[in-house]
Image (tube, rainbow, N blue to C red):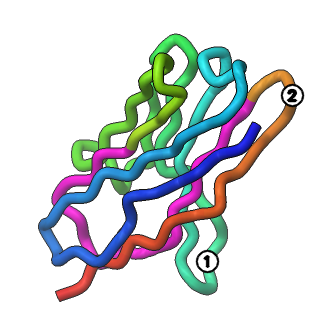
Amino acid sequence: VQLQASGGGLVQPGGSLRLSCAASGSIFSLSTMAWFRQAPGNRRDLVAAITSGGATNYADSVKGRFTISRDNAKNTMYLQMNNLKPEDTAVYYCRCASTKGLHWGQGTQVTVSS
């Protein structure tokens, strides 16, 4: 499984971004997908996850602002991020958890700054 994350960038506080994670392979629809983020000097933390059945969970810090979704027909996962805050600044990584193990994308930088 190969994952390609995209959609990061520089945005002002209160702004929005949508991240995408495109996956190769035929197991996407059977996999639990997730977004993690890592700021400099910090550990990599879970942001949001979505199961193959569509169940979702979020870190408390992003509840009500971020929405995770997936399109199995396109083998793609999304993270809609609204009302962004400076503390959301980090490299965002997508991850696929399947019967073949854990697979990580290369990360995309999100910077929230005025």
Q: Nearer the viewer, mark 1 or mark 2?
A: 2
Q: Residue furthest left?
A: 14
Where is residue 73 drawn, in percent x and y? Answer: 47, 17
Position of the C terminus by quadrant: bottom left
Position of the N terminus by quadrant: top right
Residue nearest the observer in this picture, 1 or 112? 1
| Residue 103 drawn in magenta | no
Q: Which residue is mark 1?
A: 42
Label 1 CA crowd tier, 10 Å (few <14, some 14–19, many 20+): few
Among the 4 quarters of the image, the one containing residue 12: bottom left
For the residues labelled 1 and 2, say whether their Cβ atoms are less than 8 Å apart: no
Residue 22's place in the image compared with 47, above or below, is above
Q: Amino acid at mark 1?
A: Asn
Residue 23's place in the image compared with 9, above or below, is above
Q: Which residue is mark 2?
A: 100
Residue at the (79%, 40%) spot, across then down:
102
Where is residue 2 drawn, in percent x and y? Answer: 72, 43
Q: Secondary structure at mark 1?
A: loop
Residue 42's place in the image compared with 88, above or below, is below
Among the 4 quarters of the image, the one containing residue 34: top right
> What's drawn in magenta, residue-wise?
79-97
Residue at the (43%, 41%) spot, across then down:
58
Q: Amino acid at mark 2?
A: Lys
Residue 63 placement, left or right of 104: left
